Every structure is written in C-alpha cells, then in structure tokens.
Amino acid sequence: MRTEQKKKAKYEESVTGAFFAWKYRKRATGTLSAWKQNTGDMARHNCARRSAAPYLSALLLLAACAISLLAGKYPLSLEKLLAGDAMQLRILLTLRIPRTLMAVLGGFALGAAGFVFQTVFRNPLAAPDMIGVSSGASAGAAFAILFLPASAAAVTFSAFAGGLLAVGIALGLASAAGGASIVLAGIAVHSLAQTVLMVLKLTADPERQLASIEYWIMGSLNAITLDRIPFYCAVCVVGLIGLFLLHRQIILLSVDEAEARMLGVPVGQMRLLILLLATLVVASVISVTGVISFIGLLSPHIARLLTRDNRPHTLALSGLLGGILLTAADILARTAAASELPVSIFTSLLGAPFLLYLIMGGNGGDRHEA
Amino acid sequence: MKHDTYKNFNAPTGKEKPGETDIRKAEIRKADTPKADVCLRVSSLSAGYGRSQILKDVSFRANQGEITGLLGPNGCGKTTLLRALCRQLPYTGSCLLNGHPLEKMTARQLARQISYIPQRSGISISLPVIDAVLMGFNPVLGLLEQPSRVHIKKAHEALRAVGMEECAEQDYQQLSEGQKQLCILARTIVEDASLLLLDEPESSLDFPHRHRLMRLLRELICQPAPFYDAAGASDHNGDSFNDRGSAPSDNDTTSGNTGGDAPKAALVTLHDPQLALEYCSRLILLKDGSCTAVLHPATDSIASMETALSRIYGSIRLCAFEENGRRSLVLLP
C-alpha cells in the first residue's frame, strides 16, 4: 500500500510538471476523500477550549455581593448579624439586600444587553441608547418628576414607559421605512427624546425639580426598597432568559443580512424580537436605577477579549462582568465620599482601565493563535 | 478503497489515472444530453433596483451535477441575477427550482433549497470556525433548538472535507481570506441545499486558493453523493440527514430528492473567465442585462467561443492546447 502511494506521488510530481498544481491538487484530494472517514469528532469538539473566566467572575461577583451587603454608611458586621442585632438585620433586609440585588441583576442585565446590541447592530460601539432607551427613560422620569405626584414608584414607572415608548417609535419607524434603518430611526428618536428632556428641564423649578432630574439621569442605586423592584426584576429576568435562549439567533444576526436570510433567518422579525427583549431588560433596570453608562459598552468587550468567541458563555460572562462592575461601583459610590456619588463615575473608572489593559495585550493577547 | 476515492482527483494525465478523464467525459455527456436533470429553470427573468431595470428577459437553466457559470463585465447584472434568485429583489418572469416556482416557497423552504456563498462572508464577530459551519444547519433547526451531536459531527466532517479540520476551534476572524471561503464552503456542504449560488467566490483569493475552492466545488457538485455513499453509509447509517426528514414540515414538498446528498447544481458568477472556462460545464454570457450566449467549454468549437467571448469582453483570443486528451483553454487579450 505504502509503496503504491509513494509510486503515485512520484508519478504525479514528474508528470504534472507544475509543482503548485500538484501540491494543492493533492491536498484537496486527500481532504475530500477523508470526508468518508469517520473518526471521533465529538472528542475534538468536547475538548474545545473552555475559558475559566466565567467561573472566576462568578466567584468575584459573589465576593462583591458579600462586601456590598456589609459596606456602607452604617457598616454591618457578620458577628452582630449572627448575634441577631435587630437594627443590623433591618438594614440588611430593607436596604442592603434590595440594593445588592438590583446592582447584581442590573449590572448583569446591562452587560448582557450590551452584548446583544453590539452583536445585532454589528457595531462595537452600539449601546442601548442607540435606539433611544435611556433618553426615552430620562424624558419619562423628568415628566414624572414635573407633573406626577412625587413618588419614587411614579418616576420609575414613567421612566419605564418612556424607554419602551421611545424604542417602540424607533422600531415602528424603521419597519415602516423598510427595516434596514433601525439605527437611523433610533438616532432620530434619541434626539427627539433629548429635545423633550431639554424642554422639560427648562420648565423645571431649578431648585428642586431640575436637581432631581439631573440626579436621576446620573444614576444611583440609592433608596431602592424591596417593594419597588419585584415587577421590574421579573421583567428583567424574563427578558434575560429570552435572550439566552435566542443566543444562536443573535449570533446569526451578526452575519450580513442577505447571508443570514439565506441561512433561513427571518432577519426583520428576529431582529425586532431580540431588540424588544433587550430593550425590556435595559428599560426595567434603568427605570429603577437611573441611567447607568458604560457597563453596556465595556463589559461585552471585556468578555469577548477574555473568551475570544461569542458562545453563550461569553454572553453570560458579559453579564457577570456587568454585575461585578455595577456592584463594585455601587460599593465605591456609597463609601468613597461623605455623600453618595453617582454610580456611573465608578463604572467607567473601574471598567475602562481593565478594558485598556486587555487591549494593550496584558492578557497575553494572541494566546489562541496557533 | 483508498484508491477509489483518490483517483477522482488526480492530475489530468490520461492513462494511468482514468478518474479525471472519466469525470470530464461524464460532464461532457451531461452537457450534451438535454435530458440532464434541470435544477433551476429561469425564463424571461427581469429584475432591477427601483426603476432602473438591470436584467432584461434572461432565460437559462442550471442542470444538476453541473457548475453553471455566469460571465460578463462589471455591471452586466450577474449579482442582480443572484439577488433576484435569493428573492432579495422583485422580479418578473418565472424561476422554477426543481419544478417548483421560487416565489411560492416560504423563506425557510428557500433557505433549505438554496445555499448562498457571497464574495466574502459577512461574519463580523469572532467565533470559532466550527460555529460558523454549524450556522449551515439553521434552516433545519427550530428557533430555540441547538445543533445536536450529529450536526456537530457532520460539521467537523465538512471541515475535514475542505481541509480545515485543524482550524475547527480557531477564531474565524483570524483566518486568511482563502481559509474563510473554505470555511463557508464547509458551511455550504452541511446545508446540503440543491442549488448553490456563488457570487464571485474567488474574488479575494490568491491563485492556489482559487483553484482549490473551485476544485472542491466541482467535486461537491459533479460527483453524485460523494459524502455519504459506500463507506459513509455504513458508518452513518443514514442517521444524519434523516434528521432533516424528522425536522418539522415541508422539505419533501419542494424537492424531488431529499434524504442525504440531494443532487446539486451550482450557479457561479466569476470574475475570472479563465477559471470559468476551466471549471464550468456551461457558461452563460451576460451583457447589459441580457443573455448573449451559452457556451459549453468542453465541447464547443474554439472559434464560436472566441466570437461569443469577444462580444462581451472586446476583442480577445482563445487558445486551446491538448494535453493527454484533455483540452485546456487559455484566454488572451
């Protein structure tokens, strides 16, 4: 057998003349006939590289949670809690647990939704605001602060409605105009919402209303209580589950539109569905917390740099990193200064250097290149 | 066994290696007999963008087991034609795919029947090569369904078929252009569609990769059931592509032959006429949106082909030289 092959090879080399032709022809031959062979491919697939990053970041998130539960103006300690100190327990239950829960869930949601927006828009700079979520929510919150009876629940609900309304208008305009221009419609709606916000600010009483509008827009996890969040958390969790289930479709949408359609993806409807889910997720978070910037932009990039693929674990990692960022930023926001600081300051202060570090190749950049 | 598969792809050198010439003869036969099964029949197709009509009354057919080339200068409507066949442009006229009108198919049926290979794939994010190949199973997967072990196995086999198995876990974005196209070809293999539409698949490839791609394409199209016959069938036991049968709905309504490895046809637009003359069984020449001639490079007379090609490319010369009983054509300016 072997001698026959050798003979064959020798023969080819001498007869065909053109060396490259022989070379590539031979390669192609070997490969197609190899199709018929049937060896253990699953083994290969199963030993696919697995990143430890999601597990590590889950641990890190747990640690951040623990700190977040204890740290603050009124520091709690484990001993006193275990000893059953009533004051400490009450603070834990009414303030720290809701706040930490919102930080973890909100960060996770913003990170995961950021991943989805970037992938679906095929744009590394895409953020929820590209289709008007946060500007709509800001306008909604400002409206509530000005015209509705002062209550946190009203502001939250109005912000939620404003965010959804803005995205609804953007997507409606886009599908009326033929689908491909969601980004343009989003930009138009975004600027409209900004204008509405500006008008509302102009009419606001500068002493109190304007200040609370500005403060809302800067975002904070302050004053979150357990009774305000169940509905929004539920919406957020449902949306997130939907996004994880649709992960394969999200990745397919990152392909060129014509190509995706020929792969059997109903591009228009699928994009609409996924954007609506992502919007629900984002709106449910920022209506409670106010606008929190950078998480949706930073954590997907960090996640992708760490895993270098876009499998579901990257989506999860993006969410986990968002959770870590927001929880850590919130801890800093309430401990760094005498008064509470806007949380967005710290999300970018923490996230941006890490992203830069990864971009500069601190992570051993090309370790996956063989 | 090894030799059986090996011979199909040898140097075009006649006696000791009859495989290649056999294939060519088979191709020639197919080109000659009008009985060859028609995969795609296009009659008086007109299409365009908005008001400007690019394609005017084009009619042709693409046979199973043949690579049909679309040749013409830039702007002659090649890409428009492919886009119309993908139903991305409104068109008038009739397109029958395996006897069924294209416009009556659902998008999903269309995706199962037609596989589209662009100049370069629009995959814009990092993902492992194997995941890019697995995208090819989307038309047969439910919305929330994940590729099964069988699908993954099949994707690996497709990658092996194009010689990319060792890249399965590499990042698609880090491949060379040639490797990317091979990866997309692997995706096409797993799609197992009956019509392949390729839009200048070779335009960003270097010389060896061009030929490698076209050879693989020829092997995929011109050899009926190369992938799951004999050796394959015993191992696979047909489990794989019967998945497709068990997937919900409609596969059998649109294609006469489903099961494994439906006979395929390819419609390829090519930039390089040389490549077209080498690999296509039939060449459709387009100029200004109309079909000017249909050539059969293997059998037509040199003079007639030269005249036809001159009509679209300006004055050119076509030379032929025989080598071991096989005619090669060279196009000179």
Image (cartoon, rainbow, N blue to C red):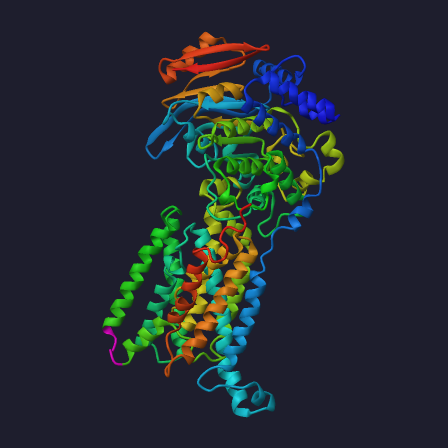
Q: Quadrant of residue A204?
A: bottom left
**Whether residue A15 can be seen here:** yes
Question: Which quadrant of the figure contains the C terminus of chain A?
Answer: top right
Residue B302 placed where, x, y %?
47, 9
**Whether residue B99 can be seen here:** no
Question: Which quadrant of the figure contains the N terminus of chain A?
Answer: top right
Q: Quadrant of residue B151?
A: top right
Identify the main secondary structure in magenta: loop
Residue B224 placed where, x, y %?
65, 26
The answer to whether B25 is drawn above or below residue B221 in the figure is above
Residue B50 placed where, x, y %?
34, 35
Residue appearing at x 45%, y 9% in the figure: B304
Q: Considering depth in this image, is B327 or B303 the residue closer to the camera?
A: B327
Q: Considering depth in this image, is A366 or A331 the residue closer to the camera?
A: A366
The answer to whether A212 is drawn above or below residue B4 in the figure is below
Does residue A364 appear left or right of residue B256 in this picture? Answer: left
Task: Give the magenta-colored segment's residue range.
Answer: A203-207
